[in-house]
Image (cartoon, rainbow, N blue to C red):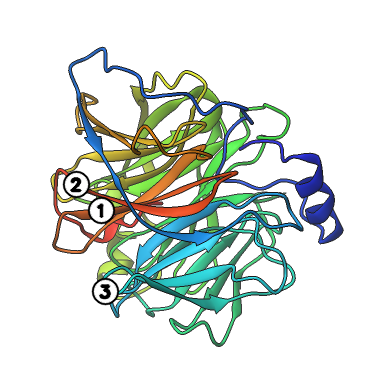
Amino acid sequence: MRRLPPRALAALTTAGLLILAGCGTETEDPGGPAAPADGARTIRAQQVMQLTRTHEETGMTLLEGPAFGPDGGLFVVDVTAPAGKPKVMRVDVRRKTVRAVHTDARGAYTSAQFSPYDGRLHLTDYAHGEIVSLAPDGSDPRTFFSGEVDGARMNPDDIAFDEKGHLYVSDSRGLSEGAEHGRVVRIDRDGGKAAVLADHLAATNGVSFDEEYRGLWISELTQNRVSYLRLSGGGTGGEGAERGEAGQGGEVTSRHTAIRVDGGIAQTDSIAVDADGNLYQGLHGRPAILVYNRHGERLATVEVPAGAKGLESATNVAITPGGTRAYMTVSGPGGGYLYAFDALGKGTRQSNGG
C-alpha cells in the first residue's frame, strides 16, 4: 500500500475512496536492476502492449489482476480508474486488443478471480470492504459479500479460491496506521458466512494456494515477508465440502514466516504459484517479479528492459493455463502495461495472481 499523490487522493476522496490497496510506500525512483546476490538468474520480460495512461482525475494508473477467463481472455483491473473509465478490461494477448468489461462510479478494484463454483468474476473493492461479482461479459453486477467480519470491516486486497469455490481473502486492515491488523478471511462460496483464519498480519496483500492446495502463501507488505499457512482438509472446506456442501472447514493448523524478501525500496505485492510450486512475488516500488521455489530459494528475478521509463511496479502475474507464457501487470507515471516472459513452470488456477 502507498499513500496516494495529492491529486489522486482528492479525486478519490470525492468518491469516498481514501486509500487503495495493491501498492507499497510511495517512492520517487523505482530503482534500477540489482545484481542477484544469491546466483538467481535474470529473466528479461518483453512489452506486449500498453493498456492505460495516467488518469487526469486521479493522477495515476495502477493495473492489477490479472486472471485468465474461461474463454482464454486475460482480465485486468485498473485500481485508480475514475468513473466512466474501464475498471475491468479483457485483453486478447494474441491479437493485442483490449476492450472494456465494467465500470462504475464507486469501486476501487484491486484483484480479479474467476470462481470454480459459479464461473463468475469476483473483484475485491478495497475502499468499500466488499467483494463484487460479475458475469464474465461484465453484466449482472452483484455484491457478493459486504459488512463486518468479527466486528471489523475488511480492506480486501486479493483472493484465492479453493477447489470447491470458497474464497480466501487477504484483508489489509491496519495498513494506513502501520499496525499489524491484517487478516486472512475465509468466505463461503455462497457469500453467507465469513470467518477470520489468521490475524495480526502486517498489511496482508498477496494470497495463493500452494500447488497441492495444502496451504496458503501470504505476502505481508509492510514486513516484506511471505508467510505460509497450513490448512486442515487441504483448504477444500472439510467433510461437508466433499459432499458438495458449503462448510467452514480449512482452518489454519500452523503458520510461519517462509521467505524474507530483500526488496530494498520495494515491497511485497501479489503472489502467483505455478504447477511446480514456484512462487512469483510481485513488487511495488520496482518493476520486477521475484521467483522462489517452495523451499524459499530464490530462482530468478524477472525484470523489464533497462530502457523502460516511467514504471514503478510489477504488481502481479498470470501464467497461461497449461503453458508457460506469463503476463505481468506493470504500472507507473508512464502508464499501465502488460509485459510477457517465459515462466519456470506451467500455469494452473493458482497461477492467476492473488
Of helix, strand and loop, which one carries label 3? loop
Q: Amino acid at mark 3?
A: Arg
The relative height of residue 116 versus residue 302 in the rendered view (above or below) is below
User: Residue 168 location, x and y as percent?
Assistant: 44, 54
Q: Would you name the residue on which mark 1 appears?
A: 326
Q: Amino acid at mark 2?
A: Ala
Q: Would you name the residue on which mark 3 appears?
A: 243
Q: Quadrant of the N terminus?
A: top right
Q: Give whichever of discs 1 and 3 has the lower sequence position.
A: 3
The reply to whether residue 251 is visible in this rendering is no
Q: Give whichever of discs 2 and 3 has the lower sequence position.
A: 3
User: Residue 86 location, x and y as percent?
Assistant: 59, 71
* Mark 1 burial class by Cα count in 10 Å: few <14, some 14-19, many 20+: many
Q: Residue furthest front?
A: 307
Of helix, strand and loop, which one carries label 2? loop
Which residue corresponds to the image point at 73% horizontal and 30% vertical from the top-left?
A: 177
Q: Nearer the viewer, mark 1 or mark 3?
A: 1
Q: Nearer the viewer, mark 2 or mark 3?
A: 2
Q: Distance between the Cα atoms at labels 1 and 3?
A: 35 Å
Q: Would you name the residue on which mark 2 appears?
A: 343
User: Residue 96 location, x and y as percent?
Assistant: 34, 70
Left or right of 346? Residue 109 is right
Of helix, strand and loop, which one carries label 1? strand
> Toward the viewer: 145 or 283?
283
Left or right of 53? Residue 236 is left
The relative height of residue 247 versus residue 202 in the rendered view (above or below) is below
The reply to whether residue 91 is visible in this rendering is yes
Q: Amino acid at mark 1?
A: Ala
